Image: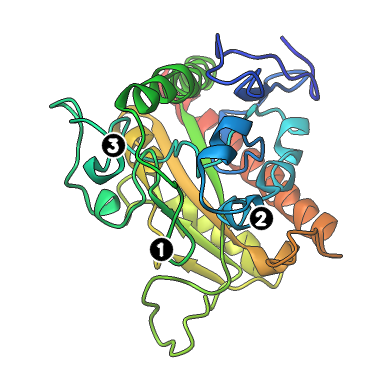
Amino acid sequence: MAKAGNRPSLAGTPHEPELDPPFEVIEPDTLTSPFVFSSPHSGSVYPQRFLASARLDAMTLRRSEDAYVDELFAGAVERGAPLVCARFPRAYLDLNREPYELDQRMFETRLPAFANTRSVRVAGGLGTIARVVGDSQEIYAHRLKVDEALARIEKLYKPYHRTLQALLGRARQAFGLAVLIDCHSMPSVSTLPLPESSDRKIKADFVLGDRFGTSCETELVDYVEHELREKGYTVLRNKPYAGGFITEHYGDPANNFHAMQIEVNRALYMDERSLEKAERFKEIAGDLSRVFERLAAYVAGRYGRQRAAAE
């Protein structure tokens, strides 16, 4: 097993030479936890061919990243859990969508019949291959070839998800359950309507998403919320972010697969305009590491006893 800090590629042939490997899996020295951490939106490697096709500059594109989220949650590896993180950006390919949520308006020719062209996310320009970033700014200067989109999905999207599924299967086999923590960041100014808010600012440091109780056992989410509140953070649940495709797809509590999305307010740990880390970055990362250390101990105690009783 690879040691913490070693980053082997599990993805096969990349679509672009810059994306070699297209994602990374950071393994602990010893697997001691049923948790798997995923950071699908923190990638910051922009292929030159992609930048050449965009009407937007690189900094504008970068503001759609969950910048540094993989680093914020990296402490989980030292506590016995793997972390898988994309190297390509979400503006290039969004892993938190169905594999074929595609917008016909973006392409030169007809999409295949199996493409989902009618989802709410596609309508908003935020499909698997995004049409817009930020405040509805169009990404591409020209229409794309359909083969280009399908190649990204085959060579980047599918290998990432196969790897994530394998890590979760390994966790459940070793510990009797698997808990996916899907790691994200959110802008401090939301594009979504917020409760009790007239200035559209997110009134929380963290938003925990469990698809309204369907993707993860409630007590696990309760525990994370309690630990974050104990550290002085404000926490919301499921509003405005309940979890996307990853949380919904992998969360199956009846079969001992739990999935929880965590959104961190970017203003906590970075300058949202310059994308530079804030002074509190190490503090936030340390607090998250300690929260999951305690959560892992709680899960080991509770589920270990349940498993022993069942045997």
Residue 86 in sight: no
Residue receiving disc 1:
136
Residue receiving disc 2:
59
User: Label 1 to label 3, Cα distance in Å?
Assistant: 18 Å
Residue receiving disc 3:
107
Residue neighbourhood size for the residue with mark 1, other residues' Cα within 10 Å, grouped as few (<14), some (14–19), many (≥20): few
What amino acid is at disc 1?
Ser
Give whichever of discs 2 and 3 has the lower sequence position: 2
User: Label 2 to label 3, Cα distance in Å?
Assistant: 25 Å
234, above or below 136, in the image = below
Residue neighbourhood size for the residue with mark 2, other residues' Cα within 10 Å, grouped as few (<14), some (14–19), many (≥20): few
SS at badge 1: loop
Q: Quadrant of residue 43?
A: top right
Residue neighbourhood size for the residue with mark 3, other residues' Cα within 10 Å, grouped as few (<14), some (14–19), many (≥20): some
The image position of residue 125, as x and y in percent, is 33, 53
Residue 2 in sight: yes
Q: Residue at x 62, y 43 (%)?
A: 42
User: Label 2 to label 1, Cα distance in Å?
Assistant: 15 Å
Q: Nearer the viewer, residue 12 or 33?
A: 12
